[in-house]
């Protein structure tokens, strides 16, 4: 099929279907090129100027995030962020979304999401050591949801297990708003010696641009624009925008790249993953960061399909590919190294003088444009903002407090809710123990890995609760960061920094852009207080189905450092007779957006109470201090389902129980006041523990030898068999997944 001429493109405007606006097209013609772009060039602009690649809508908001402190070695702008963990070592991490591909082709969408984020890690010179996920689905009683869950979980497990990288933590929630547009966010964590750090740069005139890895096919073309557009039922058939992964090839690619970066760094100038927008994004970004020019000959690009056009070659998002910039004279060395891993490595271009981006195909120049026109000159789009009516209404509505007649029955019911119930049937799909460094796997507040050859450990978690952002984006944003910090501290680790996936609807809708702006403001405020800079991340907008947006769901991925692995803190009680404390803010009536509200009313509404971040940071630091002194036996943070669920989870899987005396009502047992911990300490450490925490720790009872959860309350009692409660919690999801609705 003949490609449109520049004149036909101007007349017929195919670029409108590729997410390029008329205003942008005119600006490119009149101000950047001073001519009409051809078909290939128009395609390049459409992907590089898409929200997914350029962040043209979200850039003004992202500038609010703090991204530096004395530990940050690499902030946003590279494949992943890097933080110093001492001993000349560093931790590397990033998160990515693969939402639209997973809605269309859930197995491959989720698998390639894992593959892509792993490449980001090893392209920095780090060895990936762990994967995490954050998954949000529609209600589980729908057959389509069950299908999506099974396929997504299989895709994550299938790819990660083949790569030999443990999946050690994550989350899974269920809400109606994700029915037509599930969220599949993947996070990867790597470890490296600081001396092995790499960057995605192409500098040095005459240096080679080398393509390595799998051949290029027609899969994933316009994947970046597909991820930057509203989603509807018609798009369910857009399977060509979804790539197909090969984890065995990626394993070879990883080992080859790590050998190159660790043993032959003198051959290498820069390295970058070919992710969204394929060859075009990796090559022009590498040139742009080095202020270089680049010339590529597309005839040399390894292709697995015949008669591919320049447009198709450049925009393909085929998986398991990397782009290298190699010092002139070392081309054959690199080709030979990759050949030893049975991988293709081909010189496809050179770094050039000046700042032009030139592509040749079949002996003709098919692109000749400034590098910066694709990367730096993108028009930032001003966005209208408007407060949604529901927020204004919520401030006037009376406070919701559930009626709880029988605390025992309510606890049993809430433990069976899909968001709260045990996820073991899914997490057991993942190998969480491969490479044998895992100390704490799925099912705790955070996953923990030992850092081999040291006393240190790394704690990691993912947290995102769209319900709170829906009710109050700013407070919801603060809560997301606070919850992640609480999970990290609860394991005995100091929070170091974070990555994010910002999942929202269409930013052109003023109410949605306001949500994005407000929630990032809240997150940024919390990051400053907790000293957790945002070192990498991802924005995923247009998460809608047939015009219905998801709850804005910022996922926070956080990593923490444990100074001495012998002080890793389990979330389960350890010994009979230990004192049990409630650490943190006083429990209030925090029922807006809670699990009990959704369960009893079928919806969420109301206004959220604000957080005292400074106070929260103070007692979390004090709690960590007590842990590092060996004064704490176990710690579990209270989140979904409130204290009642946290109490139950601290005794599940043990032979112990709890006997507590709480100055709380039956309803308040299920309140979701953020930043609270249930902490157990041996009686002989009580005085020292209480001295450090002061008024922020209240003794509420003891650990008993009976497997029961008992509490005296202000207006009644809780008395539940832990065996019975655990059985309900463990069996809820397998039953729901089997049921024929």
Image (cartoon, grey):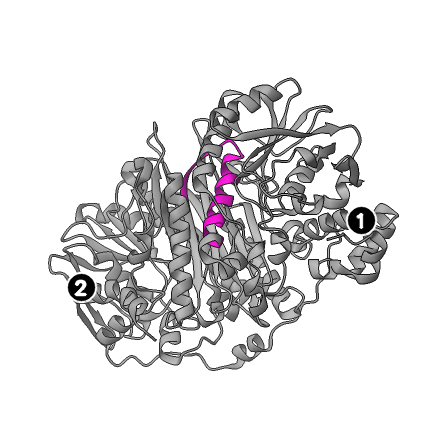
| Position of residue 715 measured from the top left corner of the image (x, y, whole percent) | 24, 77
| Position of residue 107 measured from the top left corner of the image (x, y, whole percent) | 44, 55
Q: Residue at x 40, y 64 (%)?
A: 147
Q: CA distance from mark 1 to mark 2?
A: 69 Å
Q: Nearer the viewer, residue 494 or 289?
A: 289
Q: Is residue 111 shown in magenta? A: yes
Q: Residues within 10 Å of mark 1 (few under 14, many from 20)?
A: some
**Which quarter of the picture shows residue 353?**
top right
Residue annotated with mark 2: 722
Count of marks, rendered view? 2
In the displayed structure, 375 sits above or below 737; it is above
Q: Nearer the viewer, residue 626 or 138?
A: 138
- Using the image, tell me which numbered label, if any, was put on residue 707: none
In the displayed structure, 342 sits above or below 460; it is above
Residue annotated with mark 1: 38
Question: Is most of the magenta stretch helix, strand or loop?
Answer: helix
Q: Nearer the viewer, residue 86 or 421?
A: 421
| Position of residue 249 measured from the top left corner of the image (x, y, whole percent) | 46, 37
**Label 1: element kind:** loop
């Amino acid at each position: 099929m003949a490609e449109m001429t520049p004149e036909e493109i101007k007349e017929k405007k195919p670029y409108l279907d590729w997410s390029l606006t008329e205003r942008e097209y005119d600006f490119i013609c009149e101000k950047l090129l001073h001519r009409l772009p051809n078909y290939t060039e128009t395609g390049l602009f459409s992907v590089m100027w898409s929200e997914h690649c350029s962040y043209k809508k979200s850039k003004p908001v992202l500038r609010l995030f703090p991204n530096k402190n004395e530990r940050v070695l690499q902030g946003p702008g590279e494949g992943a962020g890097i933080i110093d963990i001492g001993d000349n070592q560093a931790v590397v991490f990033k998160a990515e979304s693969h939402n639209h591909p997973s809605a269309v082709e859930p197995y491959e969408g989720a698998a390639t999401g894992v593959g892509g984020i792993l490449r980001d890690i090893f392209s920095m010179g780090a060895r990936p050591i762990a994967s995490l996920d954050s998954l949000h689905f529609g209600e589980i009683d729908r057959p389509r949801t069950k299908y999506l869950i099974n396929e997504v979980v299989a895709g994550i497990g299938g790819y990660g297990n083949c790569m030999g990288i443990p999946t050690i933590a994550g989350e899974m929630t269920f809400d109606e708003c994700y029915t037509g547009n599930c969220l599949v966010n993947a996070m990867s964590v790597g470890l490296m010696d600081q001396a092995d750090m790499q960057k995605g740069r192409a500098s040095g005139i005459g240096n080679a641009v080398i393509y390595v890895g799998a051949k290029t096919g027609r899969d994933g073309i316009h994947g970046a624009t597909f991820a930057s557009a509203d989603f509807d039922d018609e798009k369910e058939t857009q399977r060509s925008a979804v790539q197909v992964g090969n984890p065995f090839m990626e394993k070879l690619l990883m080992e080859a790249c790590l050998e190159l970066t660790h043993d032959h760094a003198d051959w290498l100038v820069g390295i970058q993953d070919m992710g969204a927008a394929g060859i075009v994004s990796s090559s022009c970004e590498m040139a742009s960061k080095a202020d270089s020019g680049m010339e590529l000959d597309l005839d040399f690009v390894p292709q697995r399909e015949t008669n591919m056009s320049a447009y198709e070659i450049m925009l393909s998002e085929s998986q398991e590919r990397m782009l290298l910039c190699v010092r002139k004279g070392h081309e054959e060395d690199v080709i030979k190294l990759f050949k030893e891993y049975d991988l293709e490595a081909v010189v496809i271009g050179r770094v050039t003088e000046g700042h032009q981006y030139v592509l040749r195909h079949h002996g003709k120049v098919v692109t000749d444009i400034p590098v910066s026109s694709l990367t730096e000159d993108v028009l930032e789009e001003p966005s209208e903002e408007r407060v949604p009516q529901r927020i204004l209404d919520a401030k006037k509505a009376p406070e919701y407090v559930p009626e709880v007649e029988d605390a025992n029955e309510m606890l049993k019911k809430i433990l069976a809710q899909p968001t709260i119930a045990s996820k073991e049937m899914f997490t057991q799909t993942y190998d969480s123990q491969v490479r044998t460094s895992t100390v704490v796997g799925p099912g705790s507040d955070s996953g923990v890995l030992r850092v081999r050859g040291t006393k240190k450990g790394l704690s990691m978690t993912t947290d995102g609760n769209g319900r709170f952002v829906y009710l109050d984006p700013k407070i919801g944003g603060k809560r997301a960061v606070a919850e992640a910090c609480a999970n990290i501290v609860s394991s005995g680790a100091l929070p170091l920094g974070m990555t994010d996936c910002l999942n929202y609807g269409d930013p052109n809708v003023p109410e949605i852009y306001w949500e994005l702006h407000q929630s990032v403001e809240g997150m940024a405020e919390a990051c400053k207080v907790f000293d957790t800079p945002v070192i990498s991340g991802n924005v995923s907008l247009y998460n809608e189905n047939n015009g219905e947006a998801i709850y804005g769901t910022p996922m926070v991925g956080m990593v923490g450092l444990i100074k001495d692995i012998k002080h890793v803190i389990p979330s389960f009680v350890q010994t009979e007779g230990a004192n049990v404390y409630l650490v943190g803010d006083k429990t209030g009536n925090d029922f807006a957006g809670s699990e009990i509200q959704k369960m009893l009313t079928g919806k969420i509404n109301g206004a959220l109470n604000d957080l005292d971040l400074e106070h929260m940071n103070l007692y979390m630091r004090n709690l960590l201090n007590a842990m590092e002194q060996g004064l704490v036996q176990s710690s579990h943070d209270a989140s979904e389902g409130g204290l009642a669920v946290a109490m139950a989870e601290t005794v599940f899987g043990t032979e112990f129980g709890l006997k507590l005396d709480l100055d709380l009502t039956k309803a308040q047992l299920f309140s979701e006041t953020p930043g609270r911990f249930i902490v157990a300490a041996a009686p002989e450490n009580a005085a020292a523990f209480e001295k450090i925490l002061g008024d922020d720790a209240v003794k509420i009872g003891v650990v008993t030898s009976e497997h029961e959860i008992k509490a005296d309350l202000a207006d009644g009692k809780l008395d539940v068999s832990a065996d019975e409660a655990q059985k309900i919690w463990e069996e809820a999801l397998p039953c729901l997944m089997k049921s024929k609705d």
